DNA sequence: TTATTATTACTAAATAATTAGTACAAAATC
DNA sequence: GATTTTGTACTAATTATTTAGTAATAATAA
């Protein structure tokens, strides 16, 4: 399942699906912020996501319960990779040093990261 | 200058402008990968970027030399913020701990990061 | 059992993004 | 000075994205 970037509207729906695990259209709609789109708008996007192979459904009578085919972890990984590739010359270190410059990183974060690296060096 | 997300094509051109500092259309085109778009396509996007207030130009005779009004640093920061906001619950720590899960870091990343952290421990 | 409600499938329409051609003007060349 | 080249501005056409209405159908309620 090769991930592609989700559009803004698609991402909004996926986030709800990831959170709920599975949902009917009305459940998705209920989670959306005001101003809520029309029921049929949500249904359209879910159908688009299904056509793209990112969502599937189970049928219960005449209704469908939708669920994601890609995990949030998987997609998040893809997005991070995209960012690192596009703006940090493919180097995670560049991203980390970007955070350091901006003082966005707590010292404990760095310590944790150092410990993690130490632990994984053996492999 | 409030940054907005750049579209794919816009980002491609901005990256070249950031790299060159300033450029004529032909310079931008020269930097693009094959298959290169038409000269006029590049000109169109530069005009769009200008209308959006992201690019400006200096006139030399009948030609324009274009330059960015937003720095790459500034935009990069915006993009990172967007990612952290959308997928890491607004926490940089969450992003760092994301890297500390198996499989999210390449071995070369591990080595680089180790060196980087070692060097910065002193501070 | 008819009317209402809920749901999906299809259609459509507006806007954004992508791509490039044509017209025109200025500059360079012959 | 006429012709070719170079560059911008305008226009246009295609595809993607966003949004939602309508038709059809099944389930539910009156």
Image (cartoon, coloured by chain):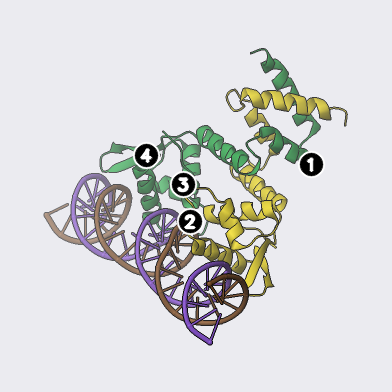
Chain colours: A green, B yellow, C brown, D purple
Report crowding for label 4: few under 14, some 14 to 19, many 20 or more residues within 10 A (C-alpha): some
Pointer 2 and pointer 3: residues touching (CB < 8 Å)? no
Residue ID for mark 4: A53
Pointer 4 and pointer 2: residues touching (CB < 8 Å)? no
Labels 4 and 3: the sequence-earlier one: 3
Q: Position of residue B74 (x, y in %)?
A: 71, 52
Q: Position of residue A41 (x, y in %)?
A: 39, 56
Mark 3 vs mark 1: tell me if same chain: yes
Report the Cα–Cα distance between label 1 and label 4: 40 Å
Report the Cα–Cα distance between label 3 and label 1: 34 Å
Q: Nearer the viewer, residue B31 or A4?
A: B31
Pointer 1 and pointer 4: residues touching (CB < 8 Å)? no
Q: Is residue A103 visible?
A: no
Q: Is residue B65 above or below residue B27?
A: below
Q: Chain of mark 3?
A: A
Mark 4 vs mark 2: tell me if same chain: no
Residue ID for mark 3: A13
The answer to whether residue C29 is left or right of residue D14 is right
Labels 1 and 4: the sequence-earlier one: 4
Q: Residue at x 70, y 56 (%)?
A: B21
* The label number, if any, that marks residue B37 in the structure image: 2
Mark 4 vs mark 3: tell me if same chain: yes
């Amino acid at each position: 399942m090769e991930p592609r970037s989700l559009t803004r509207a698609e991402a909004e729906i996926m986030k709800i699906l990831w959170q709920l695990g599975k949902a009917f259209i009305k459940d998705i709609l209920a989670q959306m912020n005001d101003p809520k789109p029309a029921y049929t708008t949500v249904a359209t996007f879910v159908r688009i996501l299904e056509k793209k192979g990112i969502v599937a459904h189970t049928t219960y009578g005449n209704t469908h319960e939708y669920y994601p085919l890609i995990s949030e972890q998987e997609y998040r990984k893809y997005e991070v990779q995209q960012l690192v590739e596009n703006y940090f010359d493919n180097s995670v270190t560049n991203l980390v040093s970007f955070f350091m410059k901006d003082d966005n990183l707590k010292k404990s974060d760095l310590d944790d990261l150092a410990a993690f690296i130490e632990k994984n060096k053996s492999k």
